[in-house]
Amino acid sequence: MYKFIITIDLKPGTRDQILARAPAVQAATRAEEGCVFYDFYTCTDDTDRLVFVEGWADKAAHEFHMEQPHTKDFIAFHEQFHKRLVFETIREA
């Protein structure tokens, strides 16, 4: 399985704009073949930090996801609010 954690530090006051769009993207993503899980969280100690946790059956499923219009549109939308983004691949030991 391919697992990822994406941490986004946001410009202050922009979180709610992203969270308003996130549920529709989450639903579309979860409907994709090969999506094992796709969740997002607001950090309790920093409300301007979002964490997305994704799991994919394989690399091909994740690559397909990255080419979907809803994925590209959501990324393009929220990039304007980033102070910092960290994309981590999680490998099972």
Image (tube, rainbow, N blue to C red):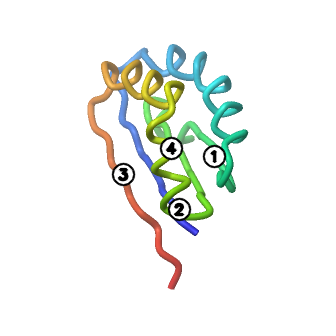
At which x and y percent is residue 53? 56, 51
Locate residue 20, reporting x and y percent: 60, 16
Amino acid type at mark 2: Lys
- Mark number displayed over residue 38: 1
Q: Residues within 10 Å of mark 2 (few under 14, many from 20)?
A: many
Residue 44, x across and y down, in percent? 56, 41
On the picture, is 75 further left or further right than 37?
left
Give neighbour class at mark 3: few <14, some 14-19, many 20+ (Cα, 10 Å). Answer: few
Helix, strand, or loop for circle 3?
A: strand
How many angstroms separate mark 1 from mark 2 (CA)?
Answer: 10 Å
Residue labelled with disc 2:
3
Q: Residues within 10 Å of mark 4 (few under 14, many from 20)?
A: some
Q: Residue at x 69, y 56 (%)?
A: 36
Q: Which callout, 3 or 4, points at the residue further toward the start of the chain?
A: 4
Q: Which residue is mark 3?
A: 87
* Disc 3 and disc 4 in contact, CB within 8 angstroms: no
Label 1 sits on a secondary structure element that is strand
